[in-house]
Amino acid sequence: MKVAVIQSEWIENIEEALERAYRAVRDIAQYGHVDFVCFPEFFLGPPWYMPGQGELKGVTDTVIPGPITDEFCELARSVGTHIVLGSLVENMTDGMYRNSSLLINPTGHIAGNAVKAHAFGNEMVLCCQADSLETFDTGLGRIGVAVCSDFWIPEVIRVFALAHARIIFVPGGTLIQNQSLMVNALSTAAYMNGVYLVYASSVGRVQGRRGERKVEVRFAGTSLVADPNGTVIARAGSDGTQTLLVDLDLERLNDCDARSWIAQRRPQAYQPLLDPYVGIRRDLTAELQMNIGAPSMSDTREVPEMGGRRKK
């Protein structure tokens, strides 16, 4: 099986960002058949709710399905590949938003929508989060999609592995301060769960204010693929755009160490995993019940209004 990992760069012009994305897929096809193409989280550019990006409201968010997804469906059909469409800020009809990663199949249809389940930063008040974790069957086996910070919750990758996902795609963004930790965490998760992890990150930065504080968020690429033995078999640099073309040997899934210890699990001993977590010296349960808590997909809270321009 062959996968392509696209490490893209945030730019100000969304039309140019779209054209670069289309061109990247077409260029990959020139090297022969690729089974999966994976984009990073927010591959069109920073979401409007990041610091200093309010003017992008209505620009980098979109409806699903819509004109943008229709174009990628046609692209997947013409090239004959699956596309894990990084993530898009999905503008829903009820005024809520979701951070959504689409799986598009080679026939040009949306085969799944992996909604981010663990909100990060401003997503905690602006985006509703998934209440369940789904895997998706393809003609090449079952896959999972963990959107960025979903990966940092160990249970997510384990749930996908228990559902017999063979490859887990992680559209994300490597924060510069987490770069070395990210590489180690991805390879460890692949090893502990006996799966391939395919991680796609953007490069770029945004600047703005968070309250009275000036902040800069910088992403440092380092897209990679880790095999079921925890070996990083391909890795991109931390600067600039890059595409990784990687052959996956699915036979490695059958003889990796994780297969034996996953079979020895004793779920009856893990009841505390279902209990609310209260941190040391902090009542996190109470905090999550306050307004900073992320809404779930069943919530009906109104999204705060922020200034911005609509895409023409």
Image (tube, rainbow, N blue to C red):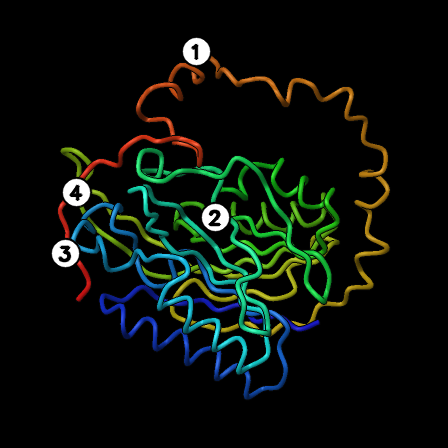
Upstream in the sequence, badge 4 or badge 1? 1
Measure the C-alpha gap from mark 2 to mark 1: 28 Å
Q: Which corner quadrant holds the N terminus? A: bottom right
Upstream in the sequence, badge 2 or badge 1? 2
The residue type indicated by label 2 comes to Cys
Q: In this view, does 190 lie to the left or right of 58?
A: right
Give the labeled residue for mark 3. 309
How far across and how far down the image is residue 260, in percent? 86, 42
Mark 2 or 1, which is nearer the eye?
2
Give the labeled residue for mark 2. 148
The reply to whether the C-beta atoms of the residues labelled 3 and 1 are less than 8 Å apart is no
Question: Residue 306, labelled with which disc?
Answer: 4
Measure the C-alpha gap from mark 3 to mark 4: 10 Å
Q: Which corner quadrant holds the C terminus? A: bottom left
Quadrant assignment, res 193: top right
The reply to whether the C-beta atoms of the residues labelled 2 and 4 are less than 8 Å apart is no
Measure the C-alpha gap from mark 4 to mark 1: 34 Å
The residue type indicated by label 1 comes to Arg
Residue at image point 53% right, 40% down? 152
The residue type indicated by label 3 comes to Arg
How far across and how far down the image is residue 118, in percent? 47, 37
Give the labeled residue for mark 1. 281
The reply to whether the C-beta atoms of the residues labelled 2 and 1 are less than 8 Å apart is no
Measure the C-alpha gap from mark 3 to mark 1: 42 Å
Residue at image point 54% right, 18% down? 276
Measure the C-alpha gap from mark 2 to mark 4: 24 Å
Above or below, comparing residue 59 to residue 123 in the picture: below
Upstream in the sequence, badge 3 or badge 1? 1
Of 180 and 134, the residue lying toward us? 134
